[in-house]
Image (tube, rainbow, N blue to C red):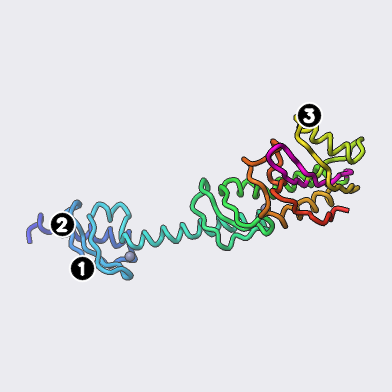
Amino acid sequence: MNENNQNASLNKKKAIDDLILLHPNYDFSKSVYKGSLNKIIFYCNIHGKQSKRYTNLKNGTACILCSNEKLSKLNMLDEKKAIDDLILLHPNYDFSKSVYIDSGSKITYICPEHGLNNVFYNNLKAGKGCLSCARKLSAKNYYENKKTIIYYIKIENDFFIQYKIGVCLKKRFTSENAIKNRYHTEIKNKIKIEILDFKLYENGIEAYDLEQLIIKNNQNNLILKENMILDSGFTETFNMNVLNEFILN
Ligand SMILES: [Zn+2]
Ligand SMILES: [Zn+2]
């Protein structure tokens, strides 16, 4: 063996030794170096025989199946953490069937009170919950410890008869005037509003909770927005009389 050949075979051995150092988990015992752009055969002890360009191996990549598995494990960890964060933030919600895609995508969860919801992950992460929960919270703050009237009215125009449950603060009015004041625009526009029943509560939260209960129990009779006589309140308006026996008093 002349000196050039000897150098060449030393270089070949070094090329493989470099790979062994870089990738101790792979078997290069049958690998032969034929130039940096040529493929090298090696063995993954999990995924078996592989071949890859020498330069790519030298750059740190090896078995494609190993790196895919590593990536998906990382993604699974990310996903678990993403859901765990939500569980900490919203202990009342059920995330057991939630699937995390990414922070800008919607995620499904179950609110014990309002059922299945589908909202942006970022919003949940920012502490927001379902819209109904938020509305309820602000309503509770609004009515807490204030004299509040729950009322049930019949709304009538030339074409329809509708029924609505509602709550309003009593303020300085009599109860009946407080309700009429709430609908003064409609009354001015010749919409017939008849108060069928009302009850005054010292703490408005009781009135609010009763209203929500009545709505929940009569959800199937809630009116469609486009069929409303009134301009607002479609989440509290029914297409039939749902309180035949008045229960407010
Ligand atoms: Zn592998
Ligand atoms: Zn909710």
Q: Does mark 2 have its CB less than 8 Å from ligand 1?
A: no
Q: Residues within 10 Å of mark 2 (few under 14, many from 20)?
A: few
Q: Residues within 10 Å of mark 3 (few under 14, many from 20)?
A: few
Using residue 13 as the reference point, say whether residue 178 is left or right of it: right
Disc 3 designates what residue? Answer: 188
**Three-letter amino acid code at disc 2?**
Lys
**Three-letter amino acid code at disc 3?**
Lys
Asked where in the image residue 24 lies, by quadrant, the reply is bottom left
Residue 144, percent from left and from top? 84, 46
Residue at the spot x=56%, y=47% of the render? 120
Asked where in the image residue 87 lies, by quadrant, the reply is bottom right
**Three-letter amino acid code at disc 1?**
Lys
Q: Nearer the viewer, mark 3 or mark 1?
A: 3
Residue 34 tag number: 2
Q: Main secondary structure of the magenta part?
A: strand
Asked where in the image residue 169 lies, by quadrant, the reply is top right
The answer to whether the residues at label 2 and label 1 have Cβ atoms under 8 Å apart is no
**Where 48 sits versus 170, above or below?**
below
Quadrant the N terminus occupies: bottom left
Q: Does mark 1 have its CB less than 8 Å from ligand 1?
A: no
Question: In what quadrant does ligand 1 lie?
Answer: bottom left
Q: Secondary structure at mark 1?
A: loop
**Between discs 2 and 3, the one toward the N terminus:** 2
Magenta part of the chain: 146-165
Of 154 and 118, nearer the camera is 154
Residue 30 tag number: 1
Residue at the spot x=50%, y=59% of the render? 77
Of 117 and 225, nearer the camera is 225
**Between discs 3 and 1, the one toward the N terminus:** 1
**Where 70 sits versus 193, above or below?**
below
Real-space CA distance between mark 2 and mark 1, rounded to the nearest whole angstrom: 13 Å
Residue at the spot x=75%, y=45% of the render? 164
